[in-house]
Image: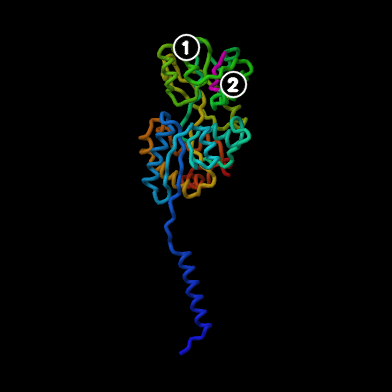
Amino acid sequence: MRIPLSVIVGIVVVVIVAGVVAYVLWPRQVAPYALSIWTGGTGGVYYPLGVKLSELLNKYASDVITASVSTSGASVANMRALAAGDANLVFVQNDIAYYAYKGIYMFEGSRVDIARGVAVLYPEVVQIVVRADSGIGSIYDLSGKRVAVGAAGSGTAVEAELILRAAGVWDYITPQYMDFATAASALKLGQIEAAFIVAGIPTSAVLELSATVPVNLVEVPDEVLSKLIEQGYRFFTRYTVPAGTYTGMTSDVRTVAVMAMLAVRADVPEHVVYTALKVMFDRLSELREAHARAKDIELAKALEGMPIPLHPGAIRFYQEKGISVPAELRP
């Protein structure tokens, strides 16, 4: 019996349509997302934390993420790598992330508006170091003094100027642009009266100095912090350095800190950022094995000092954890 051509064509069409539907609906293996994590030098904190985070992601989320780690020049270099697409997840100080996102200071003319926040990690403390016998009792006493404000072009130099301008004394100091080690030596020799150092505590350069010359830290008072926040520098957070941290410190000193944080490119898929956060906080006890600074990483504080809008995957994660996401952190 001869089958009509129209019937044959109909059967072929049905088979093709069925094949297309099956192809669309049939579950397929999606390749894991390649997450390139930029950290810092091998002697710092970012690198061991980045290596451990990479290990955790590859161990517990290998179906979603394949993570790799690179050393780098840390915060400024990492934000530039994020902009260029060489990195898609970076460790960075929150002040540098803010400058990059806004396109100011060292990022003037090269704004990194593709950056999104993931999590705040631990504090990098602003330490205004003076000799214990200096007679400097407050930030206002720095007027008329020689003050090391960090290396030229550094984040420390920017932070020192912001704080001293908020205190109204910037125009009355003699700024000296020095790195941490040089500033500690100059303080010891009496070539300067104070030095800004931004780092985790205790800082080795200050420990070494205080072993021979007792030191103290200068308080950053509430009115100065409030003014900084009012000016939009919400990356500053309150921090108290305990008495005895350095030889010469006889009481607690209230200062401020910037925060180490994670930032990601906006084009990283939502489920990748969500998964990375889930693994990091679910396995926080393992991450803390990598470095002592990781003991300060807490879910409840993951948005404190966050200076840029969050990635949608991060928003989803925090909302599921019952953490309120402020309107200003939503893209």
Label 1, label 2: how many angstroms apart (C-alpha)?
Answer: 22 Å
As for residue 44 lying within the magenta part, the answer is: no
**Can residue 223 be seen by looking at this rendering?**
no
Q: Position of residue 289 (x, y in %)?
A: 35, 35
Three-letter amino acid code at the position of disc 1: Lys
Query: Could you say whether the residue bearing mark 2 is in a helix, strand or loop?
Result: helix
Query: Which of the 4 image quadrants contains residue 110?
Result: top right
Q: Of 299 and 104, which appears nearest the observer?
A: 104
Q: Residue at x 43, y 48 (%)?
A: 65
Magenta-colored span: 146-151
Q: Quadrant of the C terminus?
A: top right
Query: Could you say whether the residue bearing mark 1 is in a helix, strand or loop?
Result: helix
Vertical arrangement, residue 152 with respect to residue 274, above or below:
above
On the picture, is 163 further left or further right than 297?
right
Q: Residue at x 38, y 32 (%)?
A: 291
Vertical arrangement, residue 153 with respect to residue 268, above or below:
above
Instruction: Sort mark 2 into few (<14), some (14-19) or many (20+) by Cα contacts within 10 Å.
Output: many
Vertical arrangement, residue 36 with respect to residue 293, above or below:
below
**Can residue 18 be seen by looking at this rendering?**
yes
Vertical arrangement, residue 99 with respect to residue 23, above or below:
above
The chosen color scheme is rainbow
Query: Which of the 4 image quadrants contains residue 223?
Result: top right
Q: Position of residue 303 (x, y in %)?
A: 50, 38
Three-letter amino acid code at the position of disc 2: Leu
Q: Earlier in the sequence, mark 1 or mark 2?
A: 2
Image mark for residue 188? 1
Mark in the foreground, 1 or 2 = 1
On the picture, is 125 further left or further right than 101?
left
Determine which residue is flagged by label 2. 164
Image mark for residue 79? none
